[in-house]
């Protein structure tokens, strides 16, 4: 639901939650400057919502004043000046029990009360599907919220693109490209593991752009023998090396679960695939797990521009009273979409998409 009558706004807050992504600081800067031009006061909540529950940590206040000086020169910076956390869900915060064990407690009502006490009229919540689901739940408790989509996985269905994605693809493409010469020199198979628990957008786009021979994504279950066929095919053609790109959540066709540890962190699939390739083909293999390098560093120009547009649009939504929404890029325009719809489904790679068809026409194998 959105409000039809623009609210009286004096003070807003901004927070960043979940994994970091290139462009977060650009959103913060745009939203802050746009809000200041409206005559509003702007507060930054550190570490997601934890800054409200922990007023001070190591001498650092949990809430900071965002002024024009505070956001000067941060558009190009990676990370977030507000900090972030992946363990800050106020609906289920981990706490140590009296018996020494860990449990979860719902402190969401405290968050809403903190906003009321500070007389914050709206929150700009910058995050991915998890963070925005939390923001939507807080909106249902009465907290005025505008969401800004952030995820390098590009898996939010309501927006064509999320900021941070193109930078991650650029980083991954560069890494894949650099592996060609060393793989060819040693006649090895190089297996590159990229982020993508549930979707394969990064692996697909960077794999195509970087010249991969095999791309494994969660949406298309793979067979090891099909991967081996591609490796042998290249050997026959005199191309005695291969580049295999695998998303961390890719799954074999036998239905075995993705390679996640007890904490839910994904990893190890590159090693598993490399071992299997060696067993079947006898080829020497090496692995590279790109990991958090995909999240780090400066955002490319596209992500800076999109992040700035999102930040400014979020302020327009507050000014117009369009609360409980998320700003989204649809075509060449920024639109406000209901927050509940935005986090309802994740955007997966269609197996018959134009990108997949292009890859197949280029001779890239998906192991299927």
Image (cartoon, helix red, strand yellow):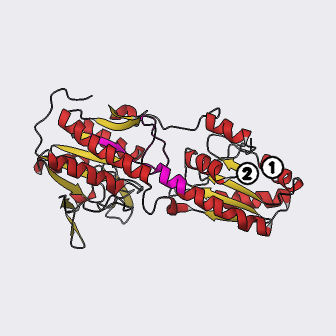
Mark count? 2
Residue 3 in the figure: left or right of residue 311: left
Residue 143, compared with residue 87, is above or below; it is above
* Quarter of the figure with residue 103: bottom left
Q: Under tag 2, what secondary structure?
A: loop
Residue 155 is a magenta residue: yes
Location of mark 1 (residue): 230
Tag 1 near tag 2, CB within 8 Å: yes
Numbered mark located on residue 112 in the image: none
Image coordinates of residue 111 in percent, x first then y, are: 22, 49
Q: Residue at x 37, y 48 (%)?
A: 305
Location of mark 2 (residue): 213
Q: Residue at x 62, y 38 (%)?
A: 355
Image coordinates of residue 332 in percent, x first then y, are: 41, 35
Image coordinates of residue 240 in percent, x first then y, are: 83, 60
Asked if residue 191 can be seen in this view, the reply is yes
Residue 267 in the figure: left or right of residue 234: left
Q: Residue at x 44, y 63 (%)?
A: 297
Asked if residue 261 can be seen in this view, the reply is no
Tell me which label, 1 or 2, sits earlier in the chain: 2
Residue 122 is a magenta residue: no
What range of the chain is rendered magenta? Answer: 146-170
Label 1 crowd (10 A; few <14 / some 14-19 / many >=20)? some
């Amino acid at each position: 639901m959105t409000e039809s009558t623009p609210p009286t706004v004096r003070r807003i807050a901004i927070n960043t939650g979940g994994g970091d992504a290139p462009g977060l600081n650009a959103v913060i800067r745009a939203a802050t400057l746009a809000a200041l031009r409206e005559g509003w006061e702007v507060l930054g909540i550190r570490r997601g919502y934890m800054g409200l529950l922990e007023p001070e940590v190591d001498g650092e206040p949990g809430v900071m004043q965002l002024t024009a000086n505070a956001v000067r020169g941060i558009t190009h910076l990676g990370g977030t000046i507000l900090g972030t956390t992946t363990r800050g869900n106020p609906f289920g915060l981990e706490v140590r029990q009296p018996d020494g064990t860990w449990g979860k407690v719902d402190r969401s009502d405290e968050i809403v009360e903190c906003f009321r006490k500070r007389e914050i009229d709206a929150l700009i919540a910058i995050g991915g599907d998890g963070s925005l689901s939390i923001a939507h739940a807080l909106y249902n408790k009465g907290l005025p919220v505008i969401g800004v989509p952030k995820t390098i996985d590009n898996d939010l269905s309501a927006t064509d693109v999320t900021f941070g994605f193109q930078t991650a693809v650029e980083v991954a493409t560069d890494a894949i490209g650099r592996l060609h010469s060393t793989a060819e020199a040693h006649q090895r198979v190089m297996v590159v593991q990229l982020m993508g628990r549930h979707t394969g957008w990064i692996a697909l786009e960077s794999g195509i752009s970087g010249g991969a021979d095999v791309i494994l994504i969660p949406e298309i279950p793979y067979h090891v023998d099909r991967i081996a066929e591609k490796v042998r095919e290249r050997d026959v053609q005199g191309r005695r090396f291969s580049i295999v790109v695998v998303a961390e959540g890719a799954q074999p066709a036998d239905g075995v679960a993705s390679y996640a540890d007890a904490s839910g962190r994904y990893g190890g699939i590159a090693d598993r695939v490399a071992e299997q390739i060696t067993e079947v083909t006898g080829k020497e293999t090496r692995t590279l797990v790109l990991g958090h390098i995909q999240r780090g560093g400066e955002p490319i120009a596209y992500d800076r521009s999109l992040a700035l547009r999102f930040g400014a649009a979020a302020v327009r939504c507050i000014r117009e009273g369009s609360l409980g929404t998320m700003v989204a890029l649809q075509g060449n325009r920024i639109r406000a979409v209901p927050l509940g719809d935005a986090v309802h489904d994740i955007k997966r790679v269609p197996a018959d998409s134009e990108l997949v068809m292009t890859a197949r026409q280029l001779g890239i194998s998906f192991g299927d």
